[in-house]
Image: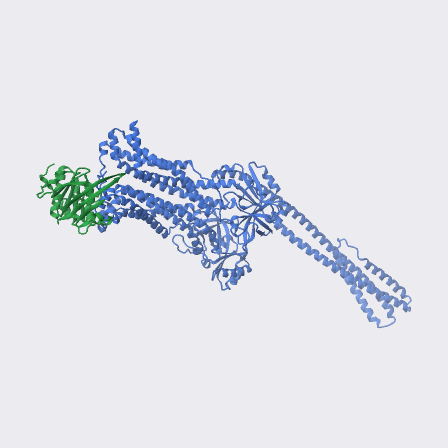
């Protein structure tokens, strides 16, 4: 036991006497473990923290939005689905005046605001709305000078209403600072959201017609669903997705069924209505026709009777005149005329009677009584005339008859006038009836069209994959995961290697001691155990401490930085520490070092005590490869030769240094490279590829002929240099089981379009030639679909599928595009092309110029104009967050470089103490001594940097491809400056280390040179 | 005055805790130019301290050391470095050759910093290593290594050749030949050589012998007819 006691004492002394070495192993393992555990736990921590925040704020697992709204029956249909909690509300687009600018906002409503509500907002300031004219606003909007107590008037097509701001909130549906979605009003962008109560605000959400159509008094357009038991899964996990998908399938199918039922109901109701209306119209039409015939016949009959009366009158007059003619010859002529008239009248009566034949079937309405009266009078007149013939001489009688004839004439005339009047009036009435009928015919046709147009009512499902903020958070987590995958490993590799060399050095140094112990009778195991205990003491605690501190620190910092720059959620950090990660960390740091130590021990100590006690013969000097290349070797100065020999003498040290330094360079290259890759795409896309100044939407589609007029109109202006009309539509492209959405742009002129968009090959940067045989596809789309030049590609446009040849693939960074010529479009669709957008180039792209042009264009039937630079500002903000990555990587790189070089230089100095002391004694000046040792570091840094460039290239490529989203392509090429920065910083780090290590060199005592080599 | 080196009342004290030990406790001696000097003393007599002080590796607590008229006791680190660089050639007990350099390169390591060095290969020839110039130290025997060390020291063309137990790590015969070489170098190049050793048997070969004991010069004798090393037995 005594011996054991001494043994432990020796161990303790061992540690104490080599504090620097112990600390160096300790700190390297600590840092390695901390980086590894820390970075690997970061994604977990980010997910756990956000998940907890989302749970706490009761993020709706599912949100449904219905275009036709949800009515009472729809709600009933899903009421009895088990295991869900539902809230009804609205969400709609509106605009509000912010800083004198009409700004798009999303309005979200809830039935009440309390912590039991779904999507419970995170109140930052103030309180929740209690009255239906109160609102809380997006904290991002609050930054735009809106205060609690302000009035916000919001408006849309449905109406407008003023709300008092009572609070400022963050909402789980809008986690990211930048993403506020799109708006159907205004310029299409949203600046933020506001939240209000359901009650009395529904009129803003949906048009009144919808209520009429659905025949409901109460409709909602948004269902928020919380799935029971979903909170036990992390929202970013597959398990969660699967769990939710089950419920979603159930709900979605029920709702979809309801919506198709609803369509059936609405459309069959409408059909019934239409049928009725049609019947009514047809009846009306029949009646009209009947009435018209009736009228025509009646008028005719009346005319006949009138004519009869006139004939009678004429006869009477004849008789009268004959009677009178005896009195005078002049009358003879008059008589002839009257007879003539009677004849004519008779013939017209014939024709009238003939006409009447046509109306045989038509029941004839009664002839006006006045006409009968006339007839009666006529017969009376006749009687008088006949009676007067007998007494011709009675002149008075004759005069009497004449008077009566005159009277009858007047009456007939009056009746005739009356009849004409009646006819006219009736005809007018009939005409207006006809008009009325025509009108209702049009309405009927419209109703028919409307019936066909009744929309089927879409239900949109929003899961966490459709909430932009959560998706972008998820993407960021993925980027960190990608980074955490390789970088800490690099660190670990280096720290394991460093502790390996350190231990080797220690075992070698203590050969004599080990030999002595062995000679004293300690077993080999006893000696080895000493090192094992030493290593475990150093690595175990370092590892535990590293895991604890790393896990606590790194995720916190990274999460904090992300939250600071991108996400406004004040979610408290919940540290995730995976057992697997701790285990991995442990395995690598403790066991690798232990294994290394054991292998050194066995190699070094597997000798007899006698051999051990003799100092190990120093490493033999060797000629190096370079010496064979005489012409280089000869040109080297003596010092350079020495340095080269030394570098290549210690191969282990050489490779470790190279790995460490190359890792450092690679990290920095990756950092700057990522930054460059991401930030480059904005200028590339919006300065190099999109060279147009503005894109104006046309309020209505125009055809080619109109386009010409439109173009002339614009080109007349001095401040507009060029215009190209295009048809732009979103399409779905399909190939190799992949399908993606893209923008189809059909251009009019192959030459002119190139003044607005650059078509060039990504790699060669050569201009692409356009042709009419095929389309130009953007490169990322081609990549996803696996399409190459001259392949064919299917796409779906307005529900019709077409197939085209790809004749070129063009550089593009945002979104997917397919460019097609008008000729090709018309060939494949068999339709003539209509234009809906116009690319515009301005003479001077200044804000004031834009203002005048915009005003002019708005007047001429153009809608919104989006300028080529405004669309990227949001993205630029996001790019700033990349700086975090760069900083993290540079700090990591610096730490890595420092650990490696510090330790290796230290070991180098310790190993060559005697040599250093000797050259000091030989009279080397301080600077010469520094150079003698540090020149090696510089050369190692240069070699390491060169290796690091290749490594960085590979790592950068990996990272960029991993973090790239489907819709964006990053610049894949590393820029020269990234290399330059990386090499400069690496060399800088090396210089710094050299500088700090001077102290160690100065401390080497010349007296060392007098000691024997041990 | 022949004196190249003058030690005047040199005291060097080390403080260990509250105890102060005088490693040199008032050392006085002088050495003339071109002499072969042996400083002898048992372990702890203060030999190494004298060596350190004379070699410009350390400075005394008090007293003055005049080398060629200059008091190196007053030199700062920079001037001491220059002193070592230009005036001192050092031969170590364990040779202290740079393992990674060939014999010739080891010599060149010294000559490249000297003001007017001798030709390295010529010196190596002179020490009998013409054939082994391009060998690494590990390929050389102990005696050969020490010859390289001597060549390295001499090639600097120093005023003073300081040798610390030059035979300490060598066997008897090799030791003898090394001492012979040193003597020869002293005579050939008219160089002042100071050999520090615990072996008093070497005394007869020196022009001047200084005996150290308890940090003081116990005695100093001049030897008008130094014995050739071959004749000395121990």
Residue A919 placement, left or right of A385: left
Q: Residue A808: in sight, yes or no?
A: no
Residue B26 placement, left or right of A594: left
Can you say which quadrant of the picture contains the C terminus of chain A? top left
Can you say which quadrant of the picture contains the N terminus of chain A? top left
- Residue B233 spot, x, y in % from top left: 10, 37
Colour given to chain B in the rendered image: green
Q: Quadrant of residue A21?
A: top left
Query: In the current view of this chain or complex, which residue is farthest to the top?
Result: A1
Tally of numbered discs: 0
Residue A268 placement, left or right of A694: right
- Residue B59 spot, x, y in % from top left: 22, 45
Q: Quadrant of residue A10?
A: top left
Residue A389 placement, left or right of B107: right
Which of A239/A108 is in front?
A108
Q: Is residue B22 above or below residue A372?
A: above
Type of colouring: by chain
- Residue A53 spot, x, y in % from top left: 50, 41
Q: Residue A907: in sight, yes or no?
A: yes
Which of A991/A188 is in front?
A991
Which of A272/A406 is in front?
A272
- Residue B216 spot, x, y in % from top left: 18, 41
Among the chains pictured, the one given blue colouring is: A
């Amino acid at each position: 036991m005594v011996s054991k006691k001494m043994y432990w004492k020796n161990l303790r002394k061992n540690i104490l006497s080599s504090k620097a070495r112990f600390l160096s192993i300790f700190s390297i393992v600590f840092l390695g473990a901390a980086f590894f555990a820390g970075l690997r736990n970061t994604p977990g921590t980010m997910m756990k923290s956000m998940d907890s925040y989302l749970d706490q704020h009761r993020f709706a697992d599912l949100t449904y939005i219905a275009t036709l709204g949800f009515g009472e029956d729809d709600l009933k249909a899903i009421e009895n689905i088990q295991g869900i909690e539902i809230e009804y509300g609205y969400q709609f687009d509106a605009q509000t005046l912010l800083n004198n600018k009409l700004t798009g906002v999303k309005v979200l409503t809830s039935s009440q605001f309390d912590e039991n509500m779904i999507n419970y907002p995170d109140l930052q300031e103030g309180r929740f709305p209690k009255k239906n004219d109160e609102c809380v606003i997006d904290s991002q909007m609050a930054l735009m000078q809106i205060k609690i107590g302000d009035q916000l008037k919001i408006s849309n097509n449905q109406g407008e209403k003023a709300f008092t701001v009572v609070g400022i909130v963050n909402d789980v549906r809008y986690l990211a600072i930048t993403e506020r979605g799109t708006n159907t009003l205004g310029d299409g962008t949203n600046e933020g959201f506001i939240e209000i109560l359901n009650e009395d605000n529904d009129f803003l959400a949906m048009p009144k017609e919808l209520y009429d159509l659905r025949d409901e008094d109460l409709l909602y357009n948004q269902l928020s669903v919380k799935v029971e038991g979903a909170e036990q899964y992390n929202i970013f996990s597959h398990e969660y997705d699967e769990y939710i998908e089950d419920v979603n399938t159930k709900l979605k199918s029920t709702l979809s069924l309801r919506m198709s039922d609803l369509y059936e109901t609405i459309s069959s109701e409408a059909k019934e209505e239409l049928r009725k209306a049609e019947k009514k119209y047809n009846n009306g039409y029949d009646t009209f026709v009947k009435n018209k015939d009736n009228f025509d016949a009646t008028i005719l009959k009346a005319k006949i009777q009138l004519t009869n009366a006139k004939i009678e009158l004429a006869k009477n007059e004849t008789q009268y005149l004959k009677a009178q003619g005896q009195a005078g010859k002049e009358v003879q002529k008059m008589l002839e005329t009257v007879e003539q008239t009677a004849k004519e009248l008779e013939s017209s009566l014939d024709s009238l009677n003939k006409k009447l034949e046509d109306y045989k079937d038509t029941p004839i309405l009664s002839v006006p009584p006045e006409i009968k009266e006339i007839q009666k009078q006529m017969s009376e007149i006749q009687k008088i005339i006949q009676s007067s013939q007998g007494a011709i001489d009675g002149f008075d009688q004759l005069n009497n008859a004449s008077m009566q004839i005159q009277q009858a004439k007047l009456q007939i005339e009056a009746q005739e006038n009356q009849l004409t009047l009646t006819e006219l009036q009736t005809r007018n009435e009939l005409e207006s009836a006809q008009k009325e009928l025509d009108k209702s015919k049009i309405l009927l046709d419209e109703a028919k069209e409307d019936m066909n147009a009744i929309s089927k009512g879409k239900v949109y499902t929003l899961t966490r994959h459709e909430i932009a903020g959560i998706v972008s958070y998820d993407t960021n987590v993925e980027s960190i995961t990608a980074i955490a995958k390789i970088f800490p490993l690099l660190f670990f590799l280096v720290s394991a290697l460093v502790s390996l060399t350190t231990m080797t050095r220690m075992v070698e140094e203590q050969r004599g001691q080990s030999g002595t112990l062995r000679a004293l009778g300690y077993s080999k195991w006893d000696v080895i155990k000493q090192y094992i205990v030493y290593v475990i003491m150093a690595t175990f605690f370092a590892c535990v401490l590293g895991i604890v501190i790393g896990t606590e620190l790194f995720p916190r910092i990274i999460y904090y930085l992300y939250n600071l720059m991108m996400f406004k959620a004040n979610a408290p950090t919940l540290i995730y520490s995976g057992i697997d990660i701790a285990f991995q960390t442990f395995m690598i740091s403790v066991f690798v070092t232990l294994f290394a130590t054991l292998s050194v021990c066995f190699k070094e100590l597997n000798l007899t005590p006698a051999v051990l006690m003799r100092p190990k013969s120093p490493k033999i000097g060797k000629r190096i490869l370079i010496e064979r290349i005489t012409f280089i070797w000869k040109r080297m100065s003596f010092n350079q030769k020495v340095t080269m020999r030394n570098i290549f003498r210690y191969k282990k040290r050489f490779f470790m240094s190279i790995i460490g330094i190359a890792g450092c360079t690679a990290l920095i290259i990756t950092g700057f490279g990522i930054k460059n890759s991401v930030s480059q795409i904005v200028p590339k896309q919006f300065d190099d590829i999109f060279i147009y100044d503005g894109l104006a939407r046309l309020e209505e589609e125009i055809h080619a002929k109109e386009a010409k007029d439109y173009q002339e109109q614009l080109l007349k202006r001095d401040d507009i240099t060029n215009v190209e009309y295009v048809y732009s539509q979103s399409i779905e492209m399909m190939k190799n089981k992949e399908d993606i959405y893209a923008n189809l742009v059909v251009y009019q002129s192959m030459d002119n379009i190139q003044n607005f968009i650059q078509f060039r090959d990504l790699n060669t940067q050569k201009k692409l030639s356009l042709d009419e045989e095929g389309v130009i596809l953007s490169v990322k789309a081609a990549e996803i679909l696996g399409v190459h030049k001259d392949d064919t590609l299917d796409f779906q446009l307005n529900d019709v599928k077409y197939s085209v040849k790809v004749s070129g693939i063009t550089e593009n960074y945002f979104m997917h595009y397919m460019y097609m010529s008008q000729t090709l479009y018309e060939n494949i669709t068999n339709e003539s092309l209509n234009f809906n957008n116009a690319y515009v180039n301005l003479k001077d792209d200044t804000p004031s110029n834009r203002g005048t042009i915009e005003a002019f264009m708005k007047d001429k039937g153009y809608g919104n104009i989006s300028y080529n630079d405004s669309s990227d500002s949001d993205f630029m903000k996001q790019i700033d967050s990349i700086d975090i990555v760069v900083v993290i990587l540079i700090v990591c790189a610096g730490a890595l470089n420092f650990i490696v070089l510090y330790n290796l230089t230290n070991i180098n100095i310790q190993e060559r103490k005697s040599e250093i002391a000797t050259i000091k004694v030989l009279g080397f000046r301080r600077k010469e001594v520094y150079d003698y040792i540090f020149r090696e570091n510089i050369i190692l840094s240069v070699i390491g940097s060169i290796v690091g460039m290749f490594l960085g290239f590979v790592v950068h490529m990996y990272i960029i491809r991993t973090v790239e989203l489907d819709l964006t392509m990053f610049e894949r090429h590393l820029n020269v400056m990234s290399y330059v920065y990386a090499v400069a910083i690496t060399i800088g780090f090396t210089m710094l280390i050299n500088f700090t290590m001077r102290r160690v060199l100065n401390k080497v005592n010349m007296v060392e040179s007098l000691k024997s080599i041990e | 005055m022949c004196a190249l080196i003058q030690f005047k009342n040199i005291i060097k004290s080390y403080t260990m805790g509250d105890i102060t030990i005088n490693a040199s406790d008032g050392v006085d001696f002088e050495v003339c130019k071109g002499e072969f000097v042996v400083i002898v003393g048992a372990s702890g007599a203060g030999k190494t301290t004298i060596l350190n002080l004379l070699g410009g590796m350390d400075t005394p607590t008090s007293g003055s050391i005049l080398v060629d008229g200059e008091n190196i006791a007053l030199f700062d680190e920079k001037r001491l470095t220059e002193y070592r660089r230009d005036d001192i050639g050092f031969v170590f007990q364990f040779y202290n050759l740079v393992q990674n350099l060939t014999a010739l390169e080891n010599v060149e390591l010294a000559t490249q910093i000297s003001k007017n060095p001798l030709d390295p290969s010529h010196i190596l020839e002179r020490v009998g290593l013409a054939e082994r110039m391009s060998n690494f130290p590990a390929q050389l025997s102990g005696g050969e290594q020490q010859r390289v060390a001597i060549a390295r020291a001499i090639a600097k063309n120093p005023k003073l050749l300081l040798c610390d137990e030059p035979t300490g790590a060598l066997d008897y015969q090799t030791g003898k030949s090394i001492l012979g070489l040193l003597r020869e170098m002293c005579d050939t190049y008219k160089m002042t050589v100071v050999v520090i050793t615990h072996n008093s048997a070497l005394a007869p070969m020196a022009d001047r012998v200084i005996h150290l004991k308890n940090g003081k010069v116990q005695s100093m004798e001049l030897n008008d007819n130094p014995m050739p090393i071959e004749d000395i037995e121990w």
